[in-house]
Image: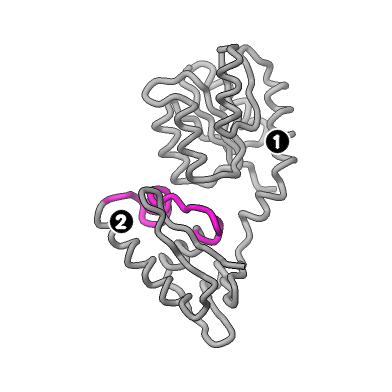
Amino acid sequence: MEKVKLLLVEDDPNLGTILSEYLEAKGFDTTLCKNGEEGYEAFTKNQYRICVLDVMMPIKDGFTLAKEIRRINQEVPIVFLTAKSLKEDTVKGFNIGADDYIKKPFSMEELMLRLNAILRRTEGQHAESQKEEYKMGSFAFNKQTQILKSNISEKKLTSKENDLLFLLCQNMNNVLDRTYALKKVWGDDSYFNSRSMDVYITKLRKYLRDDDNIEIINVHGKGFKLLIKS
């Protein structure tokens, strides 16, 4: 059975190590980061099923990291860990899009119960995000075979075309964050890679132009959106 990939961001080295070892022992594939900046870098390079974020951290706090994660992925569950008990902080966390909020000190068993409950609830969403075949208007796209086809055409995509279209399909009718796409497909968000991605977006638009109900639009300052009109 495939391990659940979990991102743990905790600046307390002792607690971080204890939590990471416990979660690994319980079957999670855990990435431990010691601040929000490290956490963001890890998130852009991996596909995580769930994130556990400390609120008070140096360089970038948990709330800021959660906002950045939400710009990339609206669905991944986020659990906050905090020593603060202020109601305003709890409300802020849930407004950002937290799935749960655990106050320190807490028992490992309590954390495990809450994580499993969230994963059970989001299992259907995960299955949807992992699918490899997508229907877009008159087109069908298969990530595994790298084939984009319609009733009148069939195109074998290059690896980068395939990976970029897959990200667009995963975020269909939602914004695909530009920085996330660059790091996921090209490895970094340099100027030259950014220009390269624009060229690939133009190519994908050309492949899809036979269907007027499909459009890849630029979202200024954010990224791209694969828009499927009903």
Q: Please, is residue 13 above or below residue 127 in the view?
A: above
Quadrant placement of the C terminus: bottom right
The residue at 52%/85% (across/down) is: 153
Closer to the camera in the image, 218 or 101 = 218
**Could you tell me which secondary element the residue under label 1 belongs to?**
helix
- Residue that mark 2 sits on: 194
Which mark is drawn over residue 146?
none
Dot 2: element: helix
The x and y percentages for residue 73 are 53, 45
Query: Mark 1 sits on what residue?
Result: 118
Q: Residue at x 39, y 31 (%)?
A: 37
Height in image: 116 above or below 224? above
In which image quadrant can residue 52 be found? top right
Where is residue 157? Give x, y as percent.
45, 74
* Relative image position of residue 36 (x, y in whole percent): 43, 29
The magenta segment is: 168-190
Q: Out of 8 and 1, give the one closest to the viewer.
A: 8
